[in-house]
Image: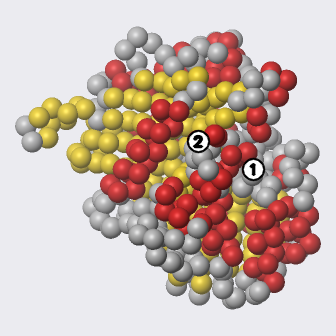
Amino acid sequence: MHGDRVRQVGTVLAATLLTAGLTATGGATPAFAAGSGPVFNVPGPAGSQAEKEAIRTQFLNVIQNAVPGSTLKMAMYHLWDTTVAQAMADAHDRGVNVQVIMDSTETADDGDGTSYPLLTAALGTNTSAASFVTLCGTKHACNSTVTPSINHNKFLIYDVDNGASSTVIQSSSNLTPSNYAKFWNDAMVVQSDQGVYQAYTAYFAKLMAKNPAGWAYLTPTPHSPYTYYFFPRPKDDPRPGDTIVNVLDNVGCTYTEGGTTKHSTVRVGMYKITRQGVADKLKALRNAGCTVDIVYTQMDSADSTGSAGTWEALHYSGGPAVRCVNFDDDSDEGTAAKPTQRQIIHSKFLLIEGKYGDDTGRKVLWTGSHNYSGPALTNNDEALLKVDDPGVYASYVTRYNAVRAAANPGTADNNPACKGVTEAPDA
């Protein structure tokens, strides 16, 4: 059974009002009043400072209101934000167990240079202790020996009394200024759901162990209305296929409902689409009668690889509607490759509406840190969360339409940035 729970949807407006200490009806709220549902930022000139930082604010609300004796566990690709780092240190000082796992590139030259030292000084680096900060191996993920690979996760677990009360935030956003101000991002907040809490906690333990030999791709497990997927899925994994292609294989493009012929809709809001199998499947769905709509930042192409790639697969007469969000917003070619000077879609979500599996009328989404790239499937530490809830789905469709409307260069995407000739900012 899907969509069997009523969820509070955390829209941009709600997140912004929470920052101001107000509810949508104008009354005062508790210091921490997060509910299950999505949170979205609004980057660029259209977003206020509060809207840009809506996801950051959600992380901070949880961290700053963690109670003594509780535990915070964060797996984050990059944390370049001294306010967030200090909030973690302050939580530790008041008796919260604070555990942080990041990628080895956290100490890269383009980081803020202060967040990681602040955390090491406050938490230490002993993973046997109740509080610590640690990095995955140099140039490789915690659960992979492939070089290069990364811990690309972006989630926070908060629990009281071993999950008696819990909050999990699964985001597409790193905790960095460019992710707030320049990149379109989303986060899904899940409160007091034992399935999600236990799954993410078990995955965090695997990251903390840093034992690639003991890692195996976790078979997706449902816990209505959620299903969770944790990567990498090594190339030698005995189960066949690509996780996203397998998902898309469940879509029926044409179906009859109430005596009327209908067509399913597939929407993709994705930073990077370079897995040929995923592109080919999206093309096949469009040719089978699905409406396929894509907003992205980067594909690969003959211009970038020497042979036809995902860009060519998805650009043809009668093909999917495709729009690119990847532009140099200061018009300075010398700074065009810098994350602080580009606007992109950094989300990684999939929306399916129509026939999915044996059911019609489905409205289901997948979101997380997982790009549709080769490394995201077979090399990197990644998390992907499926949400089977019509209300949450509706919020993501509204978000998708907002990004689609703001897409720049939009349909004029026959250019080096969108085709992968010019590398996009770090994701």
* Relative image position of residue 164 (x, y in whole percent): 52, 84
**356 lies left or right of 177:** left
Closer to us: 47 or 402: 47
Label 2 Cα crowd, 10 Å radius (few <14 / some 14-19 / many 20+): few
Side of 379 relative to 365 (left or right): right
125 w.r.t. 142: above or below: below
Q: Residue at 89% of width from left, 67% of height from top?
A: 118
Name the side, left or right, on which 252 lies relative to 192.
Answer: left
Residue 267 seen in this snapshot: yes
Which is more toward the observer, 30 or 418?
30
Callout 2 touching callout 1 (CB < 8 Å):
no
Q: Which amino acid does label 2 sit on?
A: Ala
Residue 228 on image: x %, y %:
50, 58
Above or below — where is 150 with respect to 322?
below
* Residue type for callout 1: Pro
Give above or below for 215 relative to 356. below
Residue at disc 1, secondary structure: helix
The numbered disc on residue 46 is 2
Asked where in the image residue 44 lies, by quadrant, the reply is top right
Q: Can residue 168 be seen in this view?
A: no
- Which quadrant of the figure contains the C terminus? top right
Q: Nearer the viewer, mark 2 or mark 1?
A: 2
In the rendered structure, which disc, 2 or 1, sits on the residue that comes first in sequence? 2
Q: Where does the image place residue 51, in percent across and percent down from the top left?
A: 59, 53
Furthest residue toward front: 26
Residue closer to the observer: 322 or 83: 83
- Most extreme residue toward the left, as rendered? 259
Report the residue at 53% width, 64% height from top: 17
Residue that numbered label 1 is attached to: 177
**Spatial separation of the CA atoms under disc 2 and disc 1:** 16 Å
